[in-house]
């Protein structure tokens, strides 16, 4: 049963995170920071804060003492989810590669570094922090790389489809233009023949009249 001490531990870990997110939303909503300033803050976080925070957690891991059962369970769950999403994208009429990648990212790649580690420490103690850090290490090494590959695959597929549509549209335009040119030539030849016949008639009738 969850007592007040457990609830207090969870709240002390969650409230600072949500307060920070609310302040970030309010600063943009109330125009406290300009879009250029927000871009600078985001760039600082992406280039300096997150890599240093990741290094601070990852440096504590001993690769020879990792929980192999946890790693296997985490890997199998992600692989099965990925296979199910790709089957849905290829076999279902409503499925798409974009949604498959998005759902895989949302369902299997949570924000373990910022949210997961404080929550796990508050609920299960400091000794369980290493399990979440192992998940962060695997995500950075394996699953983020796979996600980048899926993004590149999607971009290459969309580029090939775009080039194919352009080639097909150019081919239809060329065929239509060739047909139009052929019909124009035929009409011009008919007009020339009819003009020649009229000239012959005009030229013949006066001579017969005289």
Image (cartoon, rainbow, N blue to C red):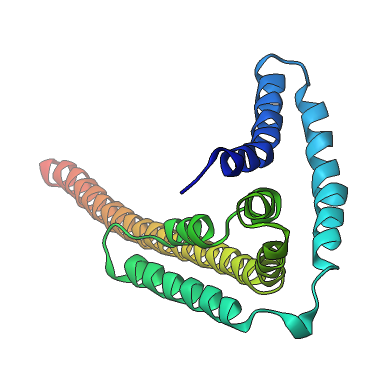
> Image height check: is 134 above or below 113?
below
Count of numbered circles in the view:
0
Quadrant in the rendering for residue 137: bottom right
Q: Position of residue 9 (x, y in %)?
A: 65, 42
Q: Could you say which is closer to the camera, residue 22 or residue 34?
A: 22
Q: Could you say which is closer to the camera, residue 114 or residue 12?
A: 12
Q: Report whether 142 appears left or right of 32.
A: left
Q: Position of residue 167 (x, y in %)?
A: 47, 64
> Image height check: is 199 above or below 165?
above
Q: Position of residue 56 (x, y in %)?
A: 86, 59
Q: Report whether 64 appears left or right of 26.
A: right
Q: Residue furthest left?
A: 209
Q: Report whether 51 appears left or right of 151.
A: right
> Image height check: is 209 above or below 157?
above
Q: Could you say which is closer to the camera, residue 176 or residue 22?
A: 22
Q: Position of residue 176 (x, y in %)?
A: 34, 57
Q: Could you say which is closer to the camera, residue 118 or residue 93?
A: 118
Quadrant in the rendering for residue 159: bottom right
Residue at (36%, 63%) from the top-left corner? Answer: 175
Residue at (49%, 62%) from the top-left corner? Answer: 104
Q: Quadrant of the C terminus?
A: top left
Q: Residue furthest top?
A: 30
Residue at (68%, 29%) from the top-left corner? Answer: 19
Q: Report whether 88 appears left or right of 111.
A: left
Quadrant in the rendering for residue 36: top right
């Amino acid at each position: 049963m969850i007592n007040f001490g457990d609830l207090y531990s969870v709240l002390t870990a969650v409230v600072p995170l949500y307060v920070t997110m609310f302040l970030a939303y309010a600063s943009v909503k109330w125009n406290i920071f300009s879009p250029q300033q927000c871009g600078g803050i985001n760039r600082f976080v992406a280039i300096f804060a997150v890599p240093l925070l990741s290094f601070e957690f990852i440096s504590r891991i001993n690769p020879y003492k990792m929980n192999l059962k946890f790693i296997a369970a985490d890997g199998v769950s992600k692989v099965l989810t990925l296979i199910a999403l790709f089957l849905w994208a290829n076999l279902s009429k409503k499925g798409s590669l974009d949604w498959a990648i998005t759902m895989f990212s949302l369902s299997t790649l949570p924000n373990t570094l910022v949210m997961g580690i404080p929550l796990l420490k508050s609920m299960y103690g400091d000794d369980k922090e290493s399990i979440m850090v192992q998940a962060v290490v695997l995500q950075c090494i394996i699953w983020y790389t796979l996600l980048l590959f899926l993004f590149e695959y999607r971009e290459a597929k969309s580029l090939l489809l775009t080039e194919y549509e352009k080639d097909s549209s150019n081919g239809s335009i060329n065929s239509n233009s060739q047909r139009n040119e052929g019909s124009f030539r035929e009409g011009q030849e008919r007009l020339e023949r009819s003009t020649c016949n009229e000239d012959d008639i005009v030229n013949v009738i006066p001579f017969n009249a005289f």
